[in-house]
Amino acid sequence: MPSGHVTPRSIAFRMPMLCLWLLLMPLSAGAECLVGFDVGSSGVRAGANHVGKVAKVRIDYLEDVWPDNRIDVTNEATIAAFRDLPQEIGAGENCAAVAGGYSAWRYALEKGKRADVAATLATFHQRAGVHFFVIPQEVEGSYAHLAAQRILKDKLQTPFVLDIGGGSMQFASRDNGWGAPLGQKSWRKRFCQSARNSANPDCAPNPVGEGALAATGKILGPEVAAARERLGQGARVTAVSSTVVREIHPILRHLFPASGEVDENGFGRRPLAEAIRRLSTLDDAGILAALDGCRFTDARPTCDPRHVATFVTDMLLLHAFLEGLSIERIEVGAADVNNVPGLLADARPRAWISHYQCYLTRLQSGGVGAFLSDPGTCPPEP
């Protein structure tokens, strides 16, 4: 079985009960202050239930975990972020603090030793006072949908949102969803292994080659089939991640300025496929020239090597799922969606605060599912 392969059972999920949990403890101005940290594959974001500001710092957790299945090199930077970011957003002192770890942390649990992850989280709690939880894929999807609703409000006209991060992606609605470890970085690693026969997750994927569309369809066949089984065909979707909103969408608007299938609100699958064909035989320098140095946008993409190298592979990832799910058009929304609002609104982290040692014990025995277990069944804390 190739590295990164996941089974339909491991990536399909149901969310009615998850949404119920989120509604059990809505935010309010009078609630006790709580700081939340979104510890994603590329960094840490911090927010609080009593301030509107969000701050972030870049930390590459996937680069840390992939060589040896351990997250350890980044620990000091994480502790510094836990201490510094609340001050940056003006959260004040003496707030309770919870953190959610996502794709990189799930990878460490699955591929490495659970005891090592639990020991790292215990260190974070001891040195920074943060209650850190490894969040299941299905819960991450519910967080993305909640954040999109709060940001887009009435502008969110589709039942599903699509969030593509660095390590994972998820389609999520209020009561349904599907996700997989197929973010920008993890998919590039998978593409390098499958299409380039390279173990280097930062291999040079460009030019992807004229047969890249067909090859990607075969590589992602199991995941696309699982998503189709869960979501059906023809789902209406709004993209809410920078990968699509600030990268793929502006590139398509530049390449097809007069197309009726690309506009300020979204784009069709057909121009996405055509863009892949135009760029598939070009190396990084050729792509940069074809995109006029990305002078058509002040936001991402910036056309530095870190971005140019994944433009086409990101398009391939998106196209595979649009085609497999028979989605002819995708809308675009806000690109600032993160998991902090969902984490702060979720009753479970608060419930686990007074049973944190029990959570760490269950994490060692049950893995990521520990977060979904009932803290009320824990023995009294020593």
Image (cartoon, rainbow, N blue to C red):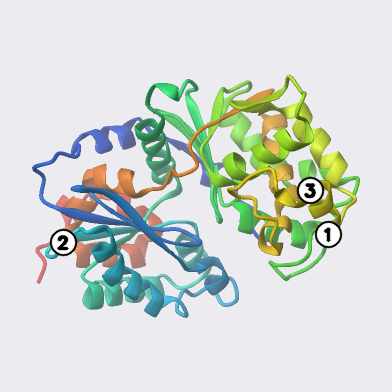
Q: Residues within 10 Å of mark 3 (few under 14, many from 20)?
A: few
Local secondary structure at mark 2: loop
Q: Is residue 228 above or below residue 114?
A: above
Local secondary structure at mark 3: helix
Pointer 2 or 1: first along the chain: 2
Q: Is residue 15 left or right of residue 247?
A: left
Cα distance in 3D space between marks 1 and 3 = 11 Å
Local secondary structure at mark 1: helix
Tell me which amino acid carries mark 2. Gly
When asked about the image quadrant of residue 188, the answer is bottom right
- In terms of depth relative to the viewer, which is nearer, 174 or 92? 92
**Label at residue 292:** 3
Cα distance in 3D space between marks 2 and 3 = 46 Å
Q: Looking at the picture, how far across and down is residue 347, in whole percent?
A: 21, 44
- Quarter of the picture containing the C terminus is bottom left
Q: Looking at the picture, how far across and down is residue 223, in whole percent?
A: 65, 42
- Quarter of the picture containing the N terminus is bottom right
- In terms of depth relative to the viewer, which is nearer, 170 or 74? 74
